[in-house]
Image (tube, coloured by chain):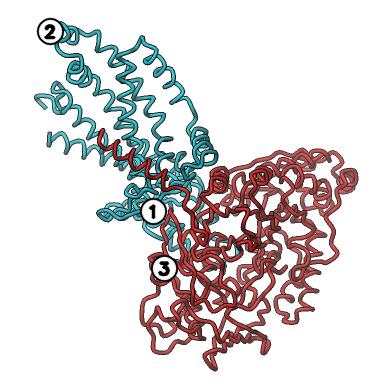
Chain colours: A red, B cyan
Amino acid sequence: MRRYFGFSAIAFSLACAFGGISHAETLRIGLASEPTAVDPHYHQTTPNEALISHIFEGLVKMSPDMELQPSLASKWEATDETTWTFYLDERAQFSNGEPFTAQDVIYSFCRILNNETAIGTGLTNVARRIQAIETPDDKTVHLKTAAPYPVLPNELARVPMIWSGIAEFDTLEFEQGGDCGVTSSWPTVNDFNQGDLVIGTGPYSLKQYDKGGTIILERNDNYWGDELPDWTEVRMVAAPSAGPRLTGLLAGDFDLIENPAARDLKRIEESNFSYEIKPSVRIMFFQLDVGRDESPFVKSPKGDNPLQNQKVRQAISMAIDRQAIIDRIMDGVAEPATQYLPQGMFGTIEDATVPEYNPEKAKELLAEAGYPDGFELTLSATNDRYINDAQLTQAVAQYLSRIGIKTNVDTMTSSVYFPKRAKREFSVSLGGWGSETGEASNYLQYWVTTTNPELGVGGSNYGGYSNPELDEIFIEATRTLDDEKRSELLQQAVQLALDDMAHIPLHFESGIWAFRPDITYEGRADQRTMATHAKLKKD
Amino acid sequence: MAVFIVRRLLQSILVLFAVSIVVFFAVYTVGDPIELLVSPDVSQEQRDAIIARLGLDKPVWDQYLSFLWRALHGDLGTSFVHGIPAVTLILQRFPATLELVIVAMILTCIFGLTLGLIAGLYRDDWMGKSIMNTSILGFSLPNFWQGMVLILLFSVWLGWLPASGRGPTTTVLGIPLSIFTVDGWRHIALPAVNLAIANIALVLRMTASGVHEAQGQDYVRFARAKGVKPGRIVRRHILRNILIPVVTVIGMEFGTLIAYSTITETVFSWPGMGKLLIDSVYRLDRPVVVAYVMLVTMLFVIINLVVDILYAVLDPRVQLLEPGT
């Protein structure tokens, strides 16, 4: 035992002597949560998609501000009502030097449809709506759909393309519910995690994937794009608690960390580190139970459900001082919401203002609605999912109590909260949603439209809100290819939702990144952390 | 001895069975993992397909029975979140935790026993007193806070050691270990010390009081009267007699650290099993939680067995099987 200690003491002193050697070309990132797989078609979560988009690319991509940009396809157009044509970039090639062709597009879609191990992803929704893929030549792809599908390019930004060379086939032909002519077995998530199949067109390739440990990416020097990233190597380590993640940055273990706590920004600045704040597309909102005459957590003097009254809902919205919540609870790091997607993005109302804060008028509205003495209400929320979720719910409860609605708060861990919300056990529930397509139809489709599994709409409409006029306008919008007209229809639908106030928008969360002072970082509205967005300062 | 071991192993099967029921149903009642797993933009049809694939559409007793059936065939289920077998997932993280705990336990033995002996032998000196008093700090400091202070001191201010993570690993006998590289030791130092401090204090105090008690015993006085050298008295007589309770504690602490060094692993972002357990509980990844608890139960059963055998080795009076049974 003593001898062992001697050895460790020597190792220890050696360790100290060799410390402090750093590699300027390596970027070490401290992640807030660990990606669960390197399979690009496994699970659509922000950490997974961030890792994957270093290695794989889609036909199109989203800019940091969620604008559509060319990626593997240099150009695309709707050639008729039900056909989108993509012209693939001539230069595009995989990290192993193989050219990217129409075959790879077909194989990628086929694999999505035949991916047994995936945890249900929006990818399958997209692939299911494609009826046929025609490839007149290696660099042209026609995607045929049954009905007009205007947001297909936006959705494709999240569909990573994989190499068809990992499969065996004679002729590859896209088909629904078949094997597309592939004779080899379909790769599983575990096959990808082993690393050999991870061949993409992106700026980085996978060097090491160590579950629970370090993920190492190395620069793909075959990268076909215009710009090679600054870092030859990227190391990602998950440090889920904000405190240790920040000390990791301050101690020099990390060069860049995601999501430090907003309250630590002062500390970061004082320690001569830099940070970047980027408003995200994640809207925080309260969803009201308007679909039922009796709601579990509402006690009204008349025995009814006051949330069904439009005036009551408007009064609730008016009672909340959004800016004060952002200043006091969110440490100033959030943007007040005027609607369900940040203003300026496709289909948003341009001249919308933050809903007025006016407790006096809110009280009057309550009285007009027939509840001069208010009623009793419980707000339900998570306490570990969104930034300051429990505190912000308490603040809203106090605002509501001020206008005479006796409000209680019930917060719980997300593993308890989400199943309960799905069973509609709440009257007012906190929600968060990032519209990753960067246009207004996404939020409407899942949260606002009347639930209809056949059309694939209203899946998260837990409040049972239903407005036939809105539904009609929305459905028309999803079938309109003309951008200008579609934007107009979406704005109408958003306006109807805002008038009814069954979903009370609060604010958009902001992403925060903190980093070494000698680098610059550009944040993304989809909250992904990308090594390619970090640059060495040149001076 | 063989009969004793076989009987203990049979008992442990019953224990495992009971544990599996409790854990399975406890995790089941928390909630439905589907809501956490599947995003709202997934169609109903697909959602149903996933529910069916994970077996969540069946009644709970049915799910438990099929779990039991597969467990008997060596399959403890596939992680909902990671899509790979739960046991594989746990075993991937096991070496990280194991090496951390072993380093911490070695520190515990060295410092705990040595300081304990000193404190016990020189109980009335300033040295013994100061050791005993400092040891109170050792187990009363909260683990989480103590870890943050270590990081602040050695990583942020002094800049000697990295604040988090595990060093590069080398594969030895198929197990990836980081203790064979200098950088590995730099990484393991702080978390191991953090884990060890409370245990050092515990072992130290037990040893000190044991030594003090033994010094007054007849056999020690007799040995001293006989003229046995003080060093031999300590080694041959005192230490051997006080080791039994100390070995029990060290054994149990070893198991506890392996299973639940969660706090230290979180503070230092150490990629061990504890972090996996917490993540899995949060995400209702039932197969991982159940498999984890089953493996940990097994570990404790084995450690208990080893401790019992060690008793017999240390103290010839202890017999593993009473005569006549």
Q: Is residue B238 left or right of residue B277?
A: left
Dot 1 or dot 2: first in sequence order is: 1
User: Alpha-carbon neighbours of circle 3 within 10 Å: few (<14), some, or many (≥20)?
Assistant: some
Secondary structure of residue under mark 2: helix
Label 1, label 3: how far apart the Cα atoms are? 22 Å
User: Alpha-carbon neighbours of circle 1 within 10 Å: few (<14), some, or many (≥20)?
Assistant: some
Q: Residue furthest top?
A: B225
Quadrant placement of the C terminus of chain A? bottom right
Query: From the viewer's perspective, is residue A65 above or below residue B164?
Result: below
Q: Tell me the subunit letter for badge 1.
A: B
Q: Are labels 1 and 3 on one chain? A: no
Q: Nearer the viewer, mark 1 or mark 3?
A: 1
The residue under label 2 is B226
Query: What label does residue B168 carry, if any?
Result: 1
Secondary structure of residue under mark 1: loop
Q: Position of residue A242 (x, y in %)?
A: 57, 45
User: In the rendered structure, which amino acid carries the disc numbered 2?
Assistant: Lys
User: Alpha-carbon neighbours of circle 2 within 10 Å: few (<14), some, or many (≥20)?
Assistant: few
Q: Quadrant of residue B132?
A: top left
User: In the rendered structure, which amino acid carries the disc numbered 3?
Assistant: Phe
Q: Position of residue A434 (x, y in %)?
A: 65, 61
Q: Is residue A433 left or right of residue A194?
A: right
User: In the rendered structure, which amino acid carries the disc numbered 1?
Assistant: Pro
Label 1, label 2: how far apart the Cα atoms are? 56 Å
The residue under label 3 is A192
Q: Tell me the subunit letter for badge 2.
A: B
Q: Is residue B229 left or right of residue A476?
A: left
Q: Residue at x 77, y 72 (%)?
A: A473
Q: Residue at x 49, y 44 (%)?
A: B163
Secondary structure of residue under mark 3: helix
Quadrant placement of the N terminus of chain A? top left
Q: Residue at x 54, y 59 (%)?
A: A47
